[in-house]
Image (spheres, helix red, strand yellow):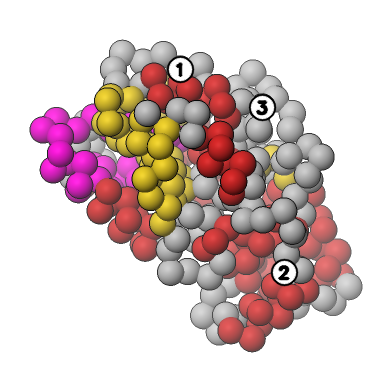
Amino acid sequence: MSKPDNDTTWNSFLAQTWNRHRPPIRPSQVVIDFYAKTLDESITKNNMLETMVLGATPEIRDLILSKNLSPVVVDYSDVNYRTLALLMRQFSTRERFINQNWITMSLDRQFDLIIGDHSLNVISSESITAMLSNLHEHMKKQGLLVVRTWIRPTTQKPDLLGVIEEYRETLQSIYPFYPTCVGPIQTCFYDDKNNSMKLAEMSSRLRKLYEQKILTEKEWSSVEILDYDNVTLEVYIPLKQEFIDIVSKSFRVIDVFYPLEPFSKYCPIFVLEKN
């Protein structure tokens, strides 16, 4: 994965088109309910809960503000922060934005709870250990890091044609194709050598499947609407055991939650406690 100074290939175009995305790319209500449960439990244990959001995810910011808390939102881009705020329902001056890089940030406080939605997937594989170490330093004793993260469950790539067939047989009457199947699709196209996956390249390969009439027009339209040709993002998707081994250097895994959603084994929520 290429590594600019901020160590992410996320660009503002993705933030500007974020309203076109659907769960599980964005958090579903089931995911938000789990975050809410974790947040409520943390409020019960802490008189004055200090919370941080990794990135500008509007649903998480709304949730924390709805609890009358004052979240600290950390993102490398103030453009992302302002753009994604347009998708929020809550508006409050209690929210504090800090324009820093998660890997090198140095803040004036420690936190009881840090929440990130796919945040660990948008940095390079080379930097995840440094990022987790820095998060560890910014957490209070027994603080929790709650992260929903794309993972590859095993080293074996899924059969893409099998994924398409499963979707058509059991899911197409309820869910749109691409966001529903994104977990296994990303894994199919993952570049093991570079330990990353470029969204633009994935989109190009899916376009070829449409041109070959393997994907229907409706299925392809759920990819095309996202206009990934203009998206520079490369995602890092670790193997499940690889991820657990990395986080265990700084945190203890106390829960792994799999939402009752299609293909959730590719996108669990890890609840991690500071060592």
User: Label 2 crowding class (10 Å Cα cut-off): few <14, some 14-19, many 20+?
Assistant: many
The residue depicted at 29 percent of the width and 32 percent of the height is 143
Indicate the amino acid at tag 2: Trp
Are dots 1 and 3 in contact, CB under 8 Å? no
Quick one: which residue is furthest to the left in this view? 47
Stretch in magenta: 39-65
Q: Nearer the viewer, mark 3 or mark 2?
A: 3
The residue depicted at 51 percent of the width and 59 percent of the height is 24
Q: Position of residue 222 (x, y in %)?
A: 64, 66
Within the image, what quadrant is residue 252 found in? Answer: top left
Q: Is residue 67 visible?
A: yes
Indicate the amino acid at tag 3: Glu
In-image side of 175 versus 208 (left or right): left
Disc 1: which residue: 105
Within the image, what quadrant is residue 271 found in? Answer: top left
Mark 3 or 2, nearer chain start: 3
Q: Position of residue 111 (x, y in %)?
A: 29, 27
The residue depicted at 78 percent of the width and 62 percent of the height is 206
Nearer to us in this view, 175 or 125: 125
Q: Position of residue 15 (x, y in %)?
A: 54, 42
Assign a secondary structure to mark 2.
helix
Disc 2: which residue: 220
Q: For residue 59: magenta?
A: yes
